[in-house]
Image: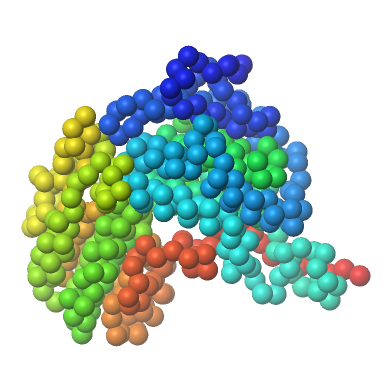
């Protein structure tokens, strides 16, 4: 396929593929629309053969020296925040990314600034995962006495990025810090952040081969995973099931994040935290609370949550006051219909019938949903939707851990130390937050679903004269 000059549709932002030879504008382009259905960008789509050759080129270059990688990552943070990329300055990028993804603009901006911070602190973020007895570079003086060197398991790391916010791109720069070359397949739901990030990295001192940007179809996506040594993918349960037996693929699936309050705690003292954990980030993130379980009568708690969430005003994504996500009206209706089916047998306090809030021009905001369960049914507690949607349920010691399993985060508001022990020992629960900490809490020294370096690196014994 031969690259072309930009088409006459100059009003559309051109999002080129970024390969070993730099920007590549293809004949095969996909129009990217805002949630209101307005065409706003053209995304160059590359075929499987281009994917294969691009990753092959990545394998032919050695990693940059550690000091050079660290300096380039710091410079990339500045480039991401200040450069004009694809004709967009930072504010223009944030505005367009919000319109495409439906994520409120204030949340989009915070996520984009999080990417800047992640670039600047990428080396700091990998250090908590590094064994204290291992050297990152065999040239360190301590290796003369013998010990371990922390080294890569491969050379090329692939990312199938999600489109629910810029923040998902804050993780994979850690692979660059560790010396991997990275191949990014963006989501068509929000392709701007990946493009801006890869461009910023190349402006800052990384070579074209170090980070490439490969918009492609499903066949090309499969080729990326085949050609890479390790891949990270985002998706629903179908994606989890597809790669369940492939140890080279790290899956970021549904979060199914929960809050558990035990009987000795007054839920009224924690209502602000609960509502914030449900609605912050537009309710679209895997770390937003999907279920609240209470050791007692959950009805008053559910009513209080519904009362708070019902006050959120539906607004267009570009409104600085917006909290709720937007979708094309047809997709919003489909989500509401899906919720209505899944909520059968529960008590709707904010039901599916009120979720879709039309904003005109063919798109809608998604109002919060709150449903009360009579018992802790895992089949309902683990239903996760891309807007503030929560299931409130009773919980008892007899119910045990079963309703809490398969959770990315559980916030435990309890005085019971043994319950914390049990949850830390439960292999299907990734993170435990105890007390007054929102479930969306993020910090470089706190693993998300384990540290990314856990799967990228290994220890090798080493000694030298």
Q: Tell me if I can see residue 409 in this picture.
A: yes
Tell whether 58 sits left or right of 415: right
Q: Quarter of the image for the C terminus: give it.
A: bottom right
Query: In terms of depth relative to the viewer, which is nearer, 217 or 369?
Result: 369
Tell whether 336 sits left or right of 285: left
Tell whether 28 sits left or right of 460: left
- x 19%, y 46%: residue: 314
- x 24%, y 53%: residue: 388
Q: Is residue 21 above or below residue 350?
A: above
Where in the figure is residue 49, as x and y percent of width and height?
A: 60, 25
Q: Quarter of the image for the N terminus: give it.
A: top right
Query: In terms of depth relative to the viewer, which is nearer, 414 or 419?
Result: 414
- x 36%, y 51%: residue: 107
- Extreme residue toward the right, this view: 465
Where in the figure is residue 290, as x and y percent of width and height?
A: 26, 59
Q: Is residue 11 above or below residue 260?
A: above
Give the total number of marks visible in the rendering.
Answer: 0
Where in the figure is residue 6, as x and y percent of width and height?
A: 54, 18
Where in the figure is residue 148, as x and y percent of width and height?
A: 74, 69
């Amino acid at each position: 396929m031969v690259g072309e000059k930009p088409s006459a549709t100059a009003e559309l932002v051109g999002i080129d593929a970024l390969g070993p030879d730099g920007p590549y504008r293809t004949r095969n382009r996909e129009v990217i629309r805002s949630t209101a259905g307005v065409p706003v960008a053209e995304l160059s789509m590359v075929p499987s053969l281009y994917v294969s050759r691009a990753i092959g080129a990545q394998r032919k270059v050695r990693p940059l020296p550690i000091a050079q990688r660290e300096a380039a990552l710091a410079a990339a943070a500045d480039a991401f925040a200040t450069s004009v990329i694809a004709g967009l300055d930072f504010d223009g990028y944030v505005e367009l990314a919000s319109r495409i993804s439906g994520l409120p603009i204030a949340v989009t901006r915070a996520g984009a600034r999080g990417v800047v911070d992640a670039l600047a602190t990428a080396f700091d973020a990998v250090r908590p995962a590094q064994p204290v007895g291992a050297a990152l570079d065999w040239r360190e003086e301590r290796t003369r006495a013998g010990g371990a060197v922390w080294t890569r398991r491969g050379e090329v790391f692939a990312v199938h990025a999600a489109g629910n916010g810029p923040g998902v791109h804050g993780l994979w720069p850690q692979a660059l810090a560790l010396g991997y070359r990275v191949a990014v397949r963006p989501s068509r739901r929000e392709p701007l952040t990946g493009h801006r990030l890869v461009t910023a990295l190349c402006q800052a001192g990384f070579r074209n081969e170090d980070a490439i940007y490969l918009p492609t179809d499903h066949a090309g996506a499969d080729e990326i995973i085949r050609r890479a040594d390790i891949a990270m993918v985002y998706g629903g349960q179908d994606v989890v099931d597809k790669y369940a037996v492939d140890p080279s693929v790290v899956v970021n699936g549904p979060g199914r994040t929960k809050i558990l309050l035990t009987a000795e705690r007054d839920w009224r003292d924690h209502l602000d935290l609960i509502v914030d954990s449900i609605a912050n980030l537009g309710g679209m993130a895997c770390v937003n609370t999907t279920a609240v379980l209470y050791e007692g009568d959950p009805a008053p708690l559910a009513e209080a949550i519904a009362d708070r969430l019902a006050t959120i005003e539906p607004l267009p994504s570009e409104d600085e006051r917006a909290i709720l996500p937007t979708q094309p009206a047809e997709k919003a209706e489909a989500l509401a219909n899906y919720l209505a089916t899944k909520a059968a047998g529960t008590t709707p306090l904010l039901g599916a019938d009120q979720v879709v809030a039309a904003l005109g021009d063919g798109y809608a905001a998604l109002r919060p949903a709150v449903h009360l369960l009579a018992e802790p049914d895992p089949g309902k507690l683990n239903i996760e939707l891309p807007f503030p949607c929560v299931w409130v349920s009773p919980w008892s010691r007899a119910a045990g851990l079963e309703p809490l399993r398969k959770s990315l985060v559980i916030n435990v508001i309890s005085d019971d130390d043994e319950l914390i022990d049990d949850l830390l020992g439960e292999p299907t629960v990734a993170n435990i937050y105890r007390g007054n900490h929102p479930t969306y809490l993020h910090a470089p020294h706190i693993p998300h679903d384990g540290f990314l370096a856990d799967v990228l690196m290994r220890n090798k014994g080493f000694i030298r004269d």
